């Protein structure tokens, strides 16, 4: 299942210098904030952001939706010329997210929880010192 939102919204936190918008982490952080807003507006209860354990990496967002605990990867791109953002979630990344999900479930004593892995795709365009969000797409049960 997929939810889509076509947006033409210029985004700047007012404190981000134009030079910083060339930094992938800065852009990723801005896109993650918009993914969180999108998920919240679509009935997700955000529980945790940027869950890390050791060197396994991180899960961008952990949220509850319906009867599921969702582990959500946010991927952003300025173009789909080389493929969609979801296509860049490699098998290796999926494996790390699954391992992190297991660690989270064990740490918070939730062994019998229904789990789902979703991907939020954010397509953006750089405009001077702003990021224009062009599209957000939620892919439920992506892997």
Image (cartoon, rainbow, N blue to C red):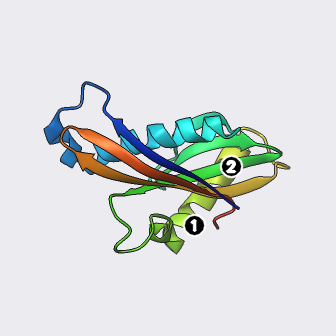
Seen at 56% across and 66% down, the residue is: 94
Instruction: State the residue position of label 1.
Output: 95
Seen at 68% across and 49% down, the residue is: 70
Residue 78, quarter of picture: bottom left
Across and down, in percent, residue 101 comes to 65, 52
Q: Left of 66 or right of it: where is 43?
A: left
Judging depth in this view, the residue of 40 and 74 nearest the camera is 40
Across and down, in percent, residue 72 comes to 59, 51
The quarter in which the N terminus is drawn is: bottom right
Instruction: State the residue position of label 2.
Output: 70
Residue 62 drawn above or below residue 81: above
The quarter in which the C terminus is drawn is: bottom right
Across and down, in percent, residue 140 comes to 67, 58
Precedes in sequence: disc 1 or disc 2 = 2
- SS category of the residue bearing label 2: strand
Seen at 68% across and 39% down, the residue is: 44
Residue 121 seen in this snapshot: yes
Judging depth in this view, the residue of 68 and 3 nearest the camera is 3
Query: How many angstroms separate mark 1 from mark 2 (CA)?
Result: 15 Å
Across and down, in percent, residue 87 comes to 48, 71
Residue 99 seen in this snapshot: no
* Image mark for residue 40: none
Seen at 34% across and 64% down, the residue is: 79
């Amino acid at each position: 299942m997929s939810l889509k939102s076509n947006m033409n919204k210029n985004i700047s936190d007012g404190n981000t210098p134009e030079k910083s918008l060339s930094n992938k982490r800065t852009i990723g952080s801005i896109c993650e904030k918009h993914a969180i807003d999108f998920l919240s507006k679509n009935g997700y209860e955000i529980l945790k952001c940027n869950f890390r354990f050791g060197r396994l990496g991180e899960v961008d967002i952990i949220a509850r939706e319906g009867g599921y605990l969702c582990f959500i990867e946010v991927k952003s791109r300025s173009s789909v010329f080389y493929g969609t953002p979801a296509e860049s979630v490699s098998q290796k990344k999926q494996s790390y997210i699954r391992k992190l999900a297991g660690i989270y479930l064990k740490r918070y004593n939730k062994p019998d929880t229904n789990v789902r892995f979703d991907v939020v795709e954010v397509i953006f365009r750089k405009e001077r010192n702003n990021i224009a969000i062009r599209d957000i797409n939620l892919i439920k049960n992506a892997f």
